[in-house]
Image (spheres, helix red, strand yellow):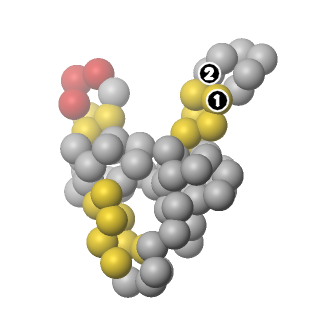
Amino acid sequence: MSMVKCAWCNGTGTDGPGGSPCDVCGGDGHINVPEPPTKCGRCKGTGRIRNDVTDQVSNCSGCGGSGWAS
């Protein structure tokens, strides 16, 4: 396993207004992923998917928002 930076919070461990803990990494800022670390193919490692119709951003369903393939 490798420790990699969480893509959703960009390694800060906080998410959204008020500095609440990131839902993806639990506030750690990093995530354990299998070796070798591989970026998610669906979101290209961003952890985010944008809905072109509603223009809303949500967690990538491929990686759960981490940005990394599991």
> Amino acid under label 2?
Gln
Residue 3 position in % (x across, y down): 30, 72
Q: Mark 2: few, some, or many residues within 10 Å (few <14, many ≥20)? A: few
Q: Which residue is drawn at 36% across and 54% down?
A: 6
Look at the picture and state if 17 lies above or below 29. above
Residue with the most extreme right position: 53
Residue with the most extreme top position: 54
Q: Mark 1: few, some, or many residues within 10 Å (few <14, many ≥20)? A: few
Residue 12 position in % (x across, y down): 22, 44
Q: Quadrant of the N terminus?
A: bottom left
* Label 1 secondary element: strand
Whether residue 21 is visible to the viewer of this picture, yes or no, is: no
Q: In this view, does 1 lie to the left or right of 45?
A: left
Q: Which mark is residue 50?
A: 1
Q: Is residue 56 left or right of residue 5?
A: right
Separation of disc 1 and disc 2 at Cα? 6 Å
* Dot 1 and dot 2 residues touching (CB under 8 Å): yes
Q: Which residue is drawn at 51% across and 52% down?
A: 45
Q: Residue 56 carries which label?
A: 2
Name the residue nearer the viewer: 62 or 42.
42
Residue 18 position in % (x across, y down): 22, 24
Name the residue nearer the viewer: 57 or 26.
57
Please tell me which of labels 1 and 2 falls first in the chain: 1
> Amino acid under label 1?
Arg
Look at the picture and state if 27 lies above or below 19. below
Q: Which residue is drawn at 37% across and 72% down?
A: 32
Q: Which residue is drawn at 34% across and 42% down?
A: 9
